[in-house]
Amino acid sequence: MLSIQNLNKSFKQAEGDVVVFSGLNFEMATGTSVALLGESGSGKSTLLHLIAGLDQVDSGEIKIDQSSITSMSEAALAEMRRHQVSLVFQQFHLISTLDIIDNIRFQAALCQRFDSDYEALLIDRLGLGKQLKKFPHQLSRGQQQRVAIARSLLHKPALVLADEPTGNLDEQSSLEVMALFSALVKNAGSSLLMVTHSREMASYLDRSVLLHSGKLGEIGAA
Amino acid sequence: MQPSSVLVLKAVFSHYWRHGWQTLFLLVGLIAGVGLWSAVQIINQQARLSYEQADSLLGVQASYWIHSRTGKAIEVDDYIHLRRAGFRQIFPVVEAEVSTQQGQPISIIATDLFALPNNLLDSGEGDTASDWLSFVQPPYRAWVPRQLAEELELQPEDQLLLRDGRRFPPALIKSHSQQGRQVLMDIAAAFALLNRETFSYLVVGNIEADQLSQLESLLPDRLELIENQQHLDLQELTQSLHTHLSAMSLLSFAVGLFIVFNAVRFSLWYRRPTFMNLRLMGASSSLLLSAVLIETLLWSFVGAGAGIVVGLQIGKVLLPGLGASLHSLYDATVDTQLIWQFDTLLKAWGITLLGLLWALTWPLYQQLKRNSLPANLISRASLDERQSRHYLALSSLALIGVSIFLYPRIDDAISGFLLLGLLLFGAAWLLPTLLAFTLRLVSHLTADRQLIARWLIGDGWAQLPALRTAMMALLLAMTANLGVGTLVDSFRSAFVGWLEVRQSADIYLRSSKIDYDRLLDPQDSSTWLADSHRRIGVTSRWQGRQTLIRGVDTGAPDSLKLPLAQWSGITPEATLKQWQSEENTLLANEQVHYLAGLQLGETIQLQTDKGLIDYRVIGFFYDYGNPNFQFYLPYDEVVNYWTQYHSRGIALWLKKNDEATQLLAEKAMREAGAETGDWILQSQVRKLSLNIFERTFTITAAMNALTMIVAAIALLASLLAILQERLPQFAQWRALGVRSREQMMIIACPILIFVLVAWLLAIPLGAVLSWILIHKLNIVSFGWSMPMRWDMLPAIQLGGVILLVVAATLMLASWQLRRRMPNALAQLGELA
């Protein structure tokens, strides 16, 4: 599903280049979920950005469903994100001017892949039924994150990339949202790569990998 | 360690280093607004200075003029007689109009250079004694002002060729403060060039009271002494024109201020976290307020200083055209060398500071009264927007109410422009409510449609707070453009039609030596003359204004078609017939009606040489551009009652208006005593009149265009501010798979809707503006009216221009977005 070969990435800074990845390799099978752990500043979010085509690699190759994204144009990357990849961030990034139902349908409407039964299921499982006509700022953080999750899954993407999706929530809400999230990703048949600091959160997923000194190491099956 | 106040200042000011675009737009807004305002201030100041010098001819104060009572020329002997009697302050003047071979009319002014003070030739350009001597010795010199020389492509020592083959003396190209567009030469050179030996009039310099009575007793009966009241007249006559210009410059300043307002608002908005952090760290509100006030002071210094420099440059470009118009319309000479005055800078700084304080007060008050940073800036902005929209709408209704109350009470240019200002700002302040209403309407219409339509409308609400001010600026600029454009078009249309009737004769001849009987002899003139109209006139003052009582042939072709604005009979033709047949009736120009309040059918008393005579006003005729009053009476009536009448020339209609007939006419005119420069062809008169017209409105068109540019900058500034503010949001859209063209569509569509609403509002508002300009302001300012000519084409063209402006600003914004998007995408997910 996701294949990373010999990935190199560094950032230019005043005091010289800072190497983030040097010859990083990673494979992830379709329908699996992987937790990406690592210290702050180890490059977890950068790796997620590179996989989503939000940032450019220095060298190496990233393939999603056999398609190399490292050689794609900006327009092709947008198409890839629209149809194959979903992103969930800590800040939810909902569209403030649209109501909740439109936010949930947003990406599905963009890629014109809409399943009303699945929408009903997501709304029901995420407990958003009474919030649909509200606007994002009228919801709690936990509810906003559920909306972001519903949006990321409604079009059943091949790959879901999540960057600390529960980082903005309290512990109880985090656990509830995580349980729902991992179950719904499985239900959608999508793969999930999730950045987290928490081993507890990682325990909800199939595998955990640790990013350290620019290399990925397997922690072991959950 | 630095003191805390310095640290606070550093933190507050650092915003401008980090946000170059905002800094640039703030500067552009300030400089553009101050520049346009100060350009007109400098021009007006220059004109006023020139009026103060206007009663001086070539450096000599004219206390009085000596003219011939009959309008004839003054003989050299009369002048010599006065000089020998000890009146050294008297000097002679010859004025004439000639045409170059290319048909360009040239005004000549000549005087006896020996009779003038020594500083005459001091143009401030290092004149030498040899320059001076060359003027008074053959082959003489023609002193051509720089601007005219440039127009004629004349080089130093070139000799202008006249239509009849004569040549000017070699050109000396220099400008003198009161020379205007006239070519100056010594009287001997003028005598040789014009083949004449008489003066047009004499000028009397400073004169004591006892000398004056001596001079009066010495003057022969055929000459009269006229006091110089030009200074007073010029101030009064040109006041309205200068008020018009000032009003336009204030509008430009207001539009510039919109940019400033936007930039300041955005800069405060962006610095909310900084202000909040500084307060959390213990900086007091008064310290923050002081920091912002210091910032305001610095901006006002920079804006006023740079704005004045730009204003001087704009003034330099616009002044020659305006100076030429003032000369043509009011005979006022405005020096085209700009004089810099310190008080202009002070005034510019004052209004800049006031404008900045006004732009800062409300946002700063809101800033400081809040103690926490809202979680969602967009929704906070929407709440603020709704509240301020309501305030603006209420203020708008109040302004419109006051302007409706004022409308019937307008009695001068200042109150008229006050009304226009209230109305324009009233409409501008109503615009945000109209934009919100339109969004709600479109939202209602698209409620059940595709999500993308709802997204688009939703984004419109998010953009409204940032675009509100720019849209108001755009509305003002478009309204001014349409309103003033309609005024100019209406005037052009009325003026051209009027010229065709008023200047229907083929040749206009005015000469003091002409023998009319010989010229009009039926036998001699049968080959070329179809009709003629001899006019006479008496100049006097009526109701405090210079007035011409004109004696005309009521049966002449141009009299029979005299364009009447108001008439007492059933038709204009019937009224003109009544004027021909009924005794003691007269026609007056519109200025008499509007400026002196005379009504149709009223009887006025005119002072004649045979006492007061009653005349009934039976019609008012159009008399465009004339600052004076004018009465038309039958020719014989004037001859009968005013013995001191003088000739106002003769209009000649040729049998065929071709070169051969014109040459026959010229030959006949010369044989009857006319000299070169005494006559002018219809084509030249019309060209001259239309040139004056076009020049008069050049400054208006320039101010309009500049105001439109300022409004376009306001739009661009707002768009870029939106991009800067919402970049993380746009990056998120891209992360969701939104294509860049979809993104631009979402950004562009609400802007296009807003611009469409502003344009649609500008059309009726522009029509109202032109209606008030034409039917109120023009009348109270200049005393004449014209029919309003409304045409949709300029509005459609303006719509096209605005569309291009919006497209250009969107392209710039799109380029900015593309440039900054990679960085924004890379930062996606980071905590703000």
Image (spheres, coloured by chain):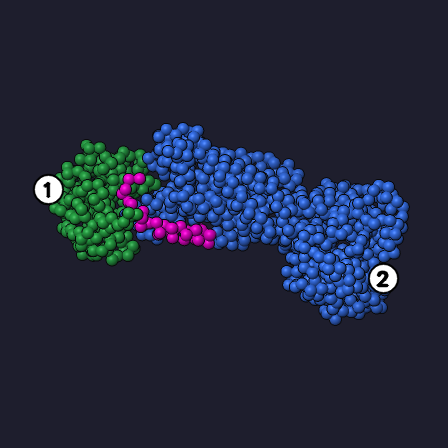
State whether residue B382 is above or below residue B142.
above
- Residue at mark 2 to residue at mark 1: CA–CA distance: 123 Å
Indicate the position of residue B534 as horizontal and vertical percent values. 81, 58
Indicate the position of residue B643 as horizontal and vertical percent values. 87, 50
Label 2 sits on a secondary structure element that is loop
Residue closer to the observer: B419 or B544: B544
Question: Magenta span has B817?
Answer: yes
Q: Colour of chain B?
A: blue
Dot 1 corresponds to which residue?
Answer: A222
Q: Chain of mark 2?
A: B
Residue closer to the observer: B128 or A156: B128
Q: Colour of chain A?
A: green
Direction from residue B90 to residue A91 in the image, left or right: left
Q: Chain of mark 1?
A: A
Label 1 sits on a secondary structure element that is loop
Indicate the position of residue A84 as horizontal and vertical percent values. 22, 51
Dot 2 corresponds to which residue?
Answer: B515
Q: Residue at x 46, y 43 (%)?
A: B26
- Few, some or many residues within 10 Å of mark 2 (<14, 14–19, 20+): some
Write the start and end of the magenta stretch as one range. Answer: B803-832
- Few, some or many residues within 10 Å of mark 1 (<14, 14–19, 20+): few
State whether residue A175 is above or below residue A79.
above
**Residue farthest left in this picture:** A221
Kindly indicate whether the residue at mark 1 contacts the one at mark 2 (C-beta within 8 angstroms). no
Q: Residue at x 49, y 34 (%)?
A: B394
State whether residue A185 is above or below residue B181.
above
Q: Amino acid at mark 1?
A: Ala
